[in-house]
């Protein structure tokens, strides 16, 4: 199975900040990587797929980059609604696997 | 508008069985592959099963293989997960999720709200 490792596990930031979350895959997954946002008591919401493609309707403050084994999710100018937990997911091969999550909290 | 609604969760004893359902609407259900994903309380996400639109391809996570069975009724726009020999570690919120694209290599663009399965004596 492909292991996905996110860092940091927790990130404290303020409204207006620029933040970056990193995701590493245990083997080459090309650009078969997605990012999800999850709020308490809600299902995950797909933000980005194919490493850098923004899902329609997702604010342009979100961006993704990377290929192979190293990926990043960047949020420019944090908004109050952005405080949530973020997961990366590889969909290169089954079993599709997730990172352990990054909780973005208000400083 | 796409809607996915899970049902069938509840409290069950270890070794027991439960069948989850996912009712789909707002899209051509038979054209999309579907998945079951679970999340234990306070934990991360775990994919557990995939079924293609035609039912010709099915995958399971090792953690549920031989105990869980996924199925679908395209005429009824419904997805199912039969769970047998349940264990305490199967306690989780179970989500159904739709593939974004056809043909493999797809993340999931729509999710249900989830149904809670609790395995305890």
Image (tube, coloured by chain):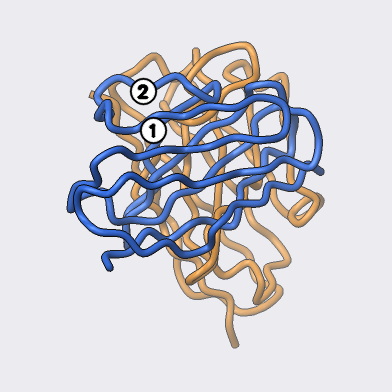
Crowd class of label 1 (few under 14; some 14 to 19; many from 20; radius 10 Å) = many
Give the image location of residue A63, x and y in percent. Answer: 40, 29
Q: Earlier in the sequence, mark 1 or mark 2?
A: 1
Q: Position of residue A45 (x, y in %)?
A: 37, 40
Subunit under mark 1: A
Chain letter for orange?
Answer: B
Residue assigned mark 1? A47
Look at 66% across and 35% down and name the residue there.
A70
Question: Do the CB atoms of the residues marked 1 and 2 lie less than 8 Å apart?
Answer: yes
Res B38 label: none
Point out the image quarter for the N terminus of chain A.
top right
Decide if residue B86 is on the left or right side of residue B73: right
Distance of mark 1 from mark 2, alpha carbons? Answer: 6 Å
Residue lying at 28% horizontally and 32% vertically, measured from the top left = A61
The image position of residue A96, as x and y in percent, is 67, 38
Q: Is disc 1 placed on a helix, strand or loop?
A: strand
Q: Quadrant of the C terminus of chain A?
A: bottom left
Q: Position of residue A21 (x, y in %)?
A: 49, 47
Does residue B50 lie above or below B56 as drawn?
Answer: below
Write down which chain is painted blue: A
Mark sitting on residue A55? 2
User: What number of labels is visible?
Assistant: 2
Nearest the viewer among A27 and B39 is: A27
Provide the secondary structure element on which disc 2 rests: loop
The residue lying at 54 percent from left, 59 percent from top is A8
The answer to whether tags 1 and 2 share a subunit is: yes
Chain of the residue that carries numbered disc 2 in the rendered image? A
């Amino acid at each position: 199975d492909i292991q996905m490792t996110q860092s940091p596990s927790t990130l404290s930031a303020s409204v207006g900040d620029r933040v970056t979350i990193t995701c590493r895959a245990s083997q080459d997954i090309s650009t078969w990587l997605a990012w999800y946002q999850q709020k308490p008591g809600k299902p995950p919401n797909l933000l980005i797929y194919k490493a850098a493609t923004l899902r329609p309707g997702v604010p342009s403050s979100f961006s993704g980059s990377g290929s192979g084994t190293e990926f990043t999710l960047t949020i420019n100018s944090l908004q109050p609604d952005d405080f949530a937990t973020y997961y990366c997911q590889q969909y290169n091969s089954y079993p599709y696997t997730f990172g352990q999550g990054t909780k973005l909290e208000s400083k | 508008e796409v809607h996915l609604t899970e049902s069938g969760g509840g409290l069950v004893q270890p070794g027991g069985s439960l069948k989850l359902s996912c009712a789909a609407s707002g899209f051509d259900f038979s054209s999309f592959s579907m998945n079951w994903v679970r999340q234990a309380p306070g934990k991360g996400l775990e994919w557990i099963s995939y079924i293609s639109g035609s039912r010709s391809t099915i995958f399971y996570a090792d953690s549920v293989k031989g105990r869980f069975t996924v199925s679908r009724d395209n005429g009824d726009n419904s997805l199912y997960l039969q769970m047998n020999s349940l264990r305490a570690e199967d306690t989780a919120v179970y989500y159904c999720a739709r593939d974004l694209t056809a043909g493999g290599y797809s993340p999931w663009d729509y999710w249900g709200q989830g149904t809670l399965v609790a395995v305890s004596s």
